[in-house]
Image: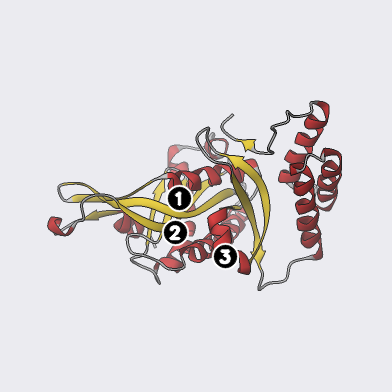
Amino acid sequence: MGLDRQSASIDRTVTNIDAAKLGLEPKEVSVLFSDIYGYRRLTRNLESTEVAYLLNEYFQSMVDAVYKSKNTFEKQIELACIRNSLIVVFGAPEYLANHPWVSLQTAVEMTQQLAEFNSRRQGGNQPPIKMGIGINSGTILSDQIGSGRRMAFTAIGDSVSLGYYLEGISKQYGCEIVLSENTYRACAEKIWVRELDLVRMRNDYTPVPIYEFLGWRSEPISQQKQQLIEHYDKARKYYMNRQFPIALGEFATVLELDSNDKPSALHLKRCQKLLKEPPADDWDGVTDLAE
């Protein structure tokens, strides 16, 4: 499968201009953003043709994952590949009732496709690629926008922006899939997560909780992962209650279970700093990512 087929859904040639809707319409959707970690470092020493080949192979795998859903919901999913990013909207142009669930299933399929892609790269002595995924569910304004016979699907709004920010957060926290509260709540009974943090994306944003997807509840998780979730949740509660010495101990316990757990390492450093420099009385535990 080439990469040309997904462009048909994003960038259409409209044969009946009178049928194109005018004006932006509110739609309830889930927006998925994914991006390659360390893209500049990965491609720094590659020729332009090598970069093009790498991206083509990578997007081939990711689009294959999306099309497992899009073949079922052809008119309810839009996607675009931009530079080294993939953007997918679930629930447009037509409504998709279970868009949070379909978006999360697609994200997991993308991680599985990436694992297969990296296995092939290792066979050629090439470094593995890492990616981050952010998903938010909410209201967007969308339409087919353009001029003349050339039209393109456009989506705007805070829900789109939040999905974009969540993808960036996935890199900062070292997580593959990060969910907004709306997406998490819609899937809560079927998935394992941990609340990573309470963050403010920009100065004009209300703080929002963010969640890391850890697995399906239909599948057993290891005792180690159960303990990790338990201690991390405890640590977060102590942290938000300003009980920094106890929180520090719980985050340290998580790192004993998994020394590579970046969210715990980030929080442990925050606890150490807050113990040295106690916060103001109005400290609310929000991590301001705008700073």
Q: What element does badge 2 sit on? A: helix
Closer to viewer: mark 3 or mark 2: 3
Viewport quadrant of the N terminus: bottom left
Q: Which residue is mark 3?
A: 187
Colour approach in the figure = secondary structure
Could you tell me the amino acid type at mark 3? Cys
Could you tell me the amino acid type at mark 2? Val
The answer to whether residue 198 is seen in the rendering is yes
Asked whether, in this view, residue 214 is left or right of residue 232, the answer is left
Q: Earlier in the sequence, mark 3 or mark 2?
A: 2
Asked whether, in this view, residue 77 is left or right of residue 284, the answer is left
State the residue in front, 114 or 118: 114
Q: What element does badge 1 sit on? A: strand
**Label 1 crowd bin: few (<14), some (14–19), many (20+), radius 10 Å:** some
**Label 3 crowd bin: few (<14), some (14–19), many (20+), radius 10 Å:** some
Q: Earlier in the sequence, mark 2 or mark 1?
A: 2
- Residue found 68% across the figure and 37% down from its top: 284
Q: Which residue is mark 2?
A: 63
- Residue 4: image x %, image y %? 33, 56
Query: Please, is residue 215 above or below residue 219 in the view?
Result: above
Viewport quadrant of the C terminus: top right
Quadrant in which residue 283 is drawn: top right
Q: Please give the count of numbered marks on the rendered protein.
A: 3
Q: Which residue is mark 1?
A: 86
- Residue found 67% across the figure and 52% down from its top: 195
Asked if marks 2 and 1 touch (Cβ < 8 Å), the reply is yes
State the residue in front, 204 or 52: 204
Q: Earlier in the sequence, mark 1 or mark 3?
A: 1
Query: Please, is residue 265 above or below residue 280 in the view?
Result: below
